[in-house]
Amino acid sequence: MSSGAFFRRPAVLLALALCSVGGVVTLLGRLVSGPPVEQKRVPLSSEAGTKAYPAFAPDGQRVAYSARGVSKVDAYHIFVRATGTDTPRQLTEGAANDVSPAWSPDGGNIAFLRISEGKAQYMVIPAAGGTQRNVAEFPAAGDETQPSPAVAWTADGKSLVVVRAAEGQPPSLAVAAVDGGNVTSISHPPAASEGDSSPMVSPDGSTLAFVRTNSSDAADIFLCDLAGNATRRLTFDDRGIRGLSWTRDGRDLVYSSSRVGGWRLWRVPAFGGSPRELIVAGHRAEYPAVAPAGYAMAYVDSPSVSAIWRATLGNLDSPDERPLLRSSGRETSAAYSPDGNRIADVSDQTGNDEIWLSDADGGNRVQLTNLKGPPIGRLRWSPDSKMLLFDARGDRGYDLYTMAAAAGSKPNRVVLGGSNASWSNDGKSLYFNSRGQIWKSSANGGNPEQLAGGGAQPVESPDGKFVYFRGRRSFSRIPVAGGEVEDDVIEPEHDLIWSTTLQMTKKGAYYAEFQRGARAWVVSFYDFATKKNSIVFRLKNTDFGQGHMFSVSTDGKYILYPRVDQSQTDLMLVQNFR
């Protein structure tokens, strides 16, 4: 058949005609919309202090946010400013923390979370300022220094979606009528999880997006309707999440996650799919907010730089403190070796989390790992000071690794899906978290067995008889061979946040807890003989998310902890965001 005869066939002519029409339509669409407009990132705030939780007004011209002074003892308050050049206007004041503002659909009111004296109060205030009113009140949940976003409006403006905490249960989501009416549950997180947070209602009012946290810094996005039905999981990263927002058309969600090195912004279709990184925001972006009108996105730029500090124990009011490990990046998770001669810690000075090793005075520092990507969690030394145990993010969550504490050694993955691990006193076994449960295995990860049905941070007692671990409000213990769990064997006098550190000694146990009055982490000691707790050190300017990590030297003279050297955070605006 000749080529001319082929192209004269009716089917071929129809196909060519349709392609021509499609090309013309595409060309006309591009002519109407114009060439793609480049996104531009500009500062939205420049005042000293910490800013967080930006939220756009319905018109896209104003932003509400929380801000506090340079000192972390200062309280957060609600501010409003225009997206252009403007002087911020403060709406709230007082000693309580006011966070997570959310605009009503008509732009006339702002709802926010007030945390005061262990209470989570959901307040509403006119956007122009005025009398505040309490819509609902529950016990406070999570980290009170910088909690997860916790409030959103329903599309009709008659109710709030809030985070509700209850004794002995993980935080869940509920709908609270603005007029003070009934509170109705929406979500029912698993008992072994850390609960739900960050509610965001879609632009059409039909879908609720939220974050479900499985363990410390391990979370995913879920979707459901406003009655809590048809719940489905959207992301499968098991990574930390700090804020999310719907796009203006309701087709996608933008969120901040540590799914690769740093905190980056990602965009994922609401119907499911692979997240796509928003390169324009960089690797230290948190709490995104997309404007409901116009084409803009705001987020928090958090260039925190932290060092490992060493302080003497024994003088609570005036300890001798000095920086010991410092770099151009973020230093965390420092741990003394049991023989007291070395320190291992995690540093991102290369752009990714890596393990570094130094002498006990901070000298002769060398890089041990070259993982180039996955975030690294808690470090633990083996009893003989020759090996390190740590958890790092894998494709499906944290995995456990061991490695020799020497330059040139390679990590060896021993447990899939494990975290918060420690060694037995003889170095032959590991204790770890997996799927919200306490497990025990051999040092190479073999012969795993479940010890307890819930808890975190398992550590063997000095006498080798028990495994102590963190419960929801206190510490429990179980025999090393398994058996009956004893609850409340150590009852903290302050708040035991889910992420803590437990370090056992022959005389007692050190642990981190949150002191509400000071809005700060403290390290306390439980004495086995007297059965009493006492604060031994107050952590200052702690690194958000890592403030609970500390290490006490074997002789009890010193404590290592991460301290923020640079804590200024600013609001950034991305123009032409579509």
Image (spheres, grey):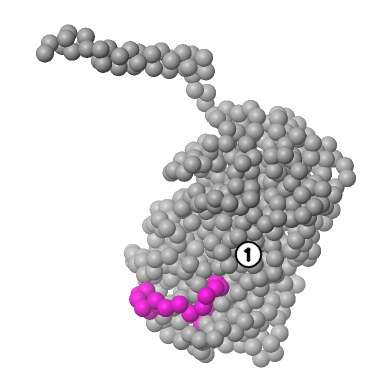
Which residue is at a point 50% across and 67% down the rendered structure image?
378
User: Between 166 and 339, which is closer to the camera in this rendering?
Assistant: 166
The secondary element bearing badge 1 is classed as: strand
Which residue is the site of mark 1?
A: 170
Mark 1 Cα shell of 10 Å, populated few (<14), some (14-19), many (≥20) = many
Which percent across, then down, holds residue 246?
Answer: 59, 40
| The magenta segment | 441-462
User: On the picture, is 353 further left or further right than 86?
Assistant: left
Which residue is at a point 36% across and 66% down the rendered structure image?
413
User: On the picture, is 521 further left or further right than 387?
Assistant: right
Which percent across, then down, holds residue 382?
Answer: 44, 77
Q: Residue furthest left?
A: 1
300 up-or-down from 472: above or below: above
Which residue is at a point 65% across and 29% down the rendered structure image?
293
User: On the picture, is 449 further left or further right than 128?
Assistant: left
Which percent across, then down, holds residue 406?
Answer: 37, 69
User: Between 163 and 39, which is closer to the camera in this rendering?
Assistant: 163
Q: Quadrant of the C terminus?
A: top right
Image quarter for residue 57? top right
Q: Residue furthest right?
A: 131
Q: Is residue 438 visible?
A: yes
354 up-or-down from 302: above or below: below
Which percent across, then down, holds residue 527?
Answer: 66, 86
User: On the picture, is 406 further left or further right than 520?
Assistant: left
Report the amino acid beneath label 1: Pro
Q: Is residue 89 visible?
A: no
Q: Quadrant of the N terminus?
A: top left
77 up-or-down from 397: above or below: above
Image quarter for residue 148? bottom right
Which residue is at a point 56% across and 81% down the rendered structure image?
468
Magenta residue check for 449: yes
